[in-house]
Image: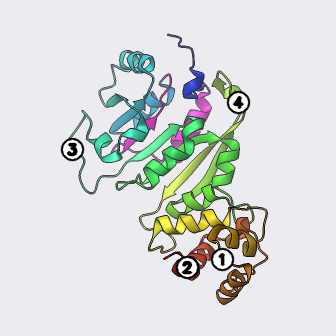
Amino acid sequence: MYLTAKKRLGQHFLINESVVERILSAAELDRADIAVEIGPGMGILTKELARRTARVIAVELDIKLVNMLNKKLVSLPNVEIVHADILKIIPEELLKGKIGTPVSSGQTYKVVANLPYYITSPILWHFLRAELKPSLMVIMVQKEVGEAIAAMPGKMTRLSIGVQLYSKPTIITYVLAKDFRPPPRVDSVVLRLDVYSEPPVEVSDVQGFFDMVHCGFSSRRKQLRNSLAHGLAISPDQVCLLLEGIGIDATRRAETLSLEEWRKLWEAFAPLRT
């Protein structure tokens, strides 16, 4: 059955089975796992997930694809196709589903998916900031986005800092546009996120921490003394004094700071925001 991809939903169907194998290998699946897939498309990855795991929950917004998948995968009793907007259903509710027993407090799951490019960041925040986080995410994203997420100090962005507070990102492989139908305008990467049980740096107020990061990147090309002064509405001289106190050069730029340095920034500047 052939369905036309819907541009408004960012649909690009993966057709290269060797890429599917690389995704599955990176996910390190076993028969006890629960896999959550977002945007299963034509079901090429869904079928392979079903063969390797105890349960697959595939969330699809397009009702035509839902109907097609329910028919195509009817022989796989451990697959549940959920017609929903993934951003409107929390993981705890999603995992209850129709298959198996209700989710327990110690339940774990893995997200394995070719994410729609236009909502990559919202989906990442949806799972990484959830009460019930996945143990692992193996996702296909736009090449530039994947490289930004996995960036090291020197090329950090608000996105990389946000994702790296919750997980350790690793680029698994690059995927060409021709591996999809229809081909997107950009290449992709398969990204593995090993989700932390506890953040690698201790932050007492996560939203306040991210507000600080936002201030630091408010004028990305400027030095910290200027971007923080602008973002926090304080004088550059005051910024310089605080930065000196934590051993950070005021002439550095936001993209050069490590996660630990952002933690130090937050602790030094948080009293100014109360």
Q: Residue at x 61, y 73 (%)?
A: 262
Q: From the viewer's perspective, is the residue at label 3 or at label 2 nearer? A: 2
Q: From the viewer's perspective, is the residue at label 3 or at label 1 nearer? A: 1
Q: Which mark is residue 177?
A: 4
Classify 240 as above or below 202.
Answer: below
Q: Which residues are magenta?
A: 15-42
Mark 1, residue position: 234
Q: Which three-letter amino acid code belongs to the residue tagged 4?
A: Ala
| Comes first in the chain, label 1 or label 4 | 4
Q: Which three-letter amino acid code belongs to the residue tagged 3?
A: Pro
Measuring from the top left, give residue 114's x and y in whole percent: 54, 36
- Side of 253 relative to 258 (left or right): right
Q: CA distance from mark 4 to mark 2?
A: 47 Å
Measuring from the top left, give residue 70's x and y in whole percent: 36, 19
Tell me if I can see residue 14 in this picture: no
The crowd level at tag 3 (other Cα within 10 Å; few <14, some 14-19, many 20+) is few
**Residue 31 lies in the magenta-colored region:** yes
| Comes first in the chain, label 3 or label 4 | 3
Q: CA distance from mark 3 to mark 4?
A: 39 Å
**Could you say whether the residue bearing mark 2 is in a helix, strand or loop?**
helix
| Comes first in the chain, label 4 or label 2 | 4
Q: CA distance from mark 3 to mark 1?
A: 51 Å
- Would you say the residues marked 1 and 2 are in contact, meaning their CB atoms lie under 8 Å apart? yes
- Would you say the residues marked 3 and 4 are in contact, meaning their CB atoms lie under 8 Å apart? no
- Would you say the residues marked 4 and 2 are in contact, meaning their CB atoms lie under 8 Å apart? no
Mark 3, residue position: 102
Q: Residue at x 34, y 52 (%)?
A: 108
The crowd level at tag 1 (other Cα within 10 Å; few <14, some 14-19, many 20+) is some
Q: Which three-letter amino acid code belongs to the residue tagged 2?
A: Leu
Mark 2, residue position: 272
